[in-house]
């Protein structure tokens, strides 16, 4: 369980303005909002990466882990990239890879011993995201913070990962920034942020009914997603793809 009653400033401009939210332990909460609304800043606060200027952020003592949208890879083996310096039993790695739908690593030339990074094998965006998720999972987080972590996955794989997380981590609170409507609909609750403020907190279908601005945002996300899929049908440079 975590409770926030806080403000946060970046320099002289408030990024989060009087955010109050209680997230019950064990739930999956989607953080939804337009670009710049303060979603990443909110996760940074929960993770303790930044401090609130006023108000308070309370998280369970067991510690939280944040997985970023563009997960970094170190020059090192798959195993080293997952363990990142902690001692992880082999079966824990296996379980984490299964939950993250990252079994592709077993098909790499040397499996878990395959060297990654500049001198090694390169991974796709979706593969990196899944590996980064496995890295977070072996740390047995009490609160798992995902910042559009699964956005580069196809919708089917993304839905599988979320279902796995729910099954494997019934005690873990998951706070996930999400922009794909089908993903948002899977969360227990939605925290809708606009311009640094919590505008609504409730079930996705309820907010769709009762909060017109939320419904418009979701419709815009759907529209963007459709445009992206159409773009994918064209032979474009992969570098032109936006992440939503
Ligand atoms: P974010 O919290 O990054 O907004 P967001 O995560 O909702 O946006 P996106 O969907 O694009 O990821 O930013 C809110 C404001 O805070 C924005 O004006 C940028 C600013 N900001 C900083 O100045 N420093 C930081 O480290 C971060 C994370 C944000
Ligand atoms: Mg962000």
Image (cartoon, grey):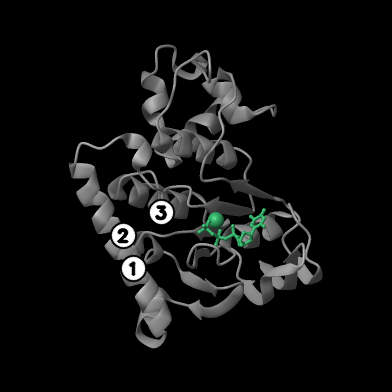
**Disc 3 beta carbon < 8 A from ligand 1?**
no
Placement of 105 over or under 182, stated as above or below: above
Q: Residue at x 81, y 68 (%)?
A: 53
Quarter occupied by residue 234: top left
Q: Residues within 10 Å of mark 2 (few under 14, many from 20)?
A: some
Q: Are marks 1 and 2 in contact (CB under 8 Å)?
A: yes
Q: Which residue is mark 3?
A: 244
In this view, 195 is above or below 62: below
| Residue closer to the observer: 111 or 94 | 111
Q: Give the residue at the far right of this rendering.
A: 54
Q: Position of residue 104 (x, y in %)?
A: 37, 27
Apparent side of residue 18 relative to residue 72 in the rendered image (left or right): right
Say which label, 3 or 1, has the lower sequence index: 1
Label 2–label 3 contact, CB within 8 A: yes
Dividing the image into 4 quarters, which one contains the C terminus? bottom left
Query: Which residue lies at the image location 49% right of the left edge and 19% below the top edge?
Result: 112
Query: Nearest the camera: 62 or 179?
Result: 179
List the residue tagged with mark 1.
220
For label 2, the SS is helix
Q: Residue at x 32, y 61 (%)?
A: 182
Q: Is label 2 within 8 A of ligand 1 (CB to nearest ligand atom)?
A: no
Q: Are marks 3 and 1 in contact (CB under 8 Å)?
A: no
Quadrant in which residue 68 is drawn? top right
Quadrant where ligand 2 appears: bottom right
The residue singled out by tag 2 in the image is 224
Q: Residue 196, position in %: x, y?
A: 61, 72
């Amino acid at each position: 369980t975590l409770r926030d009653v806080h403000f946060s400033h970046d320099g002289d401009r408030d990024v989060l303005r009087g955010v109050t939210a209680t997230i019950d332990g064990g739930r999956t909460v989607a953080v939804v909002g337009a670009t710049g609304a303060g979603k990443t800043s909110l996760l940074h606060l929960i993770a303790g990466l930044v401090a609130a200027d006023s108000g308070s952020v309370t998280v369970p003592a067991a510690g939280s882990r944040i997985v970023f949208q563009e997960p970094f890879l170190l020059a090192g083996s798959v195993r080293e990239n997952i363990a990142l310096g902690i001692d992880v039993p082999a079966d824990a790695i296996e379980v984490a890879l299964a939950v993250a739908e990252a079994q592709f690593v077993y098909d790499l030339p040397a499996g878990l011993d395959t060297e990654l990074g500049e001198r090694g094998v390169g991974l796709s965006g979706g593969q990196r995201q899944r590996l980064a998720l496995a890295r977070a999972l072996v740390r047995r987080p009490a609160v798992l913070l995902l910042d559009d972590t699964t956005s580069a996955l196809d919708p089917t794989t993304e839905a599988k990962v979320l279902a796995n997380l729910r099954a494997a981590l019934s005690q873990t609170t998951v706070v996930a920034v999400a922009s794909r409507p089908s993903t948002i609909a899977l969360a227990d609750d939605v925290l809708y942020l606009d311009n640094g403020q919590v505008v609504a907190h409730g079930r996705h279908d309820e907010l769709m009914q009762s909060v017109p601005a939320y419904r418009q945002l979701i419709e815009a996300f759907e529209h963007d997603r459709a445009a992206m899929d159409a773009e994918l049908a064209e032979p474009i440079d992969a570098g032109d793809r936006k992440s939503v």
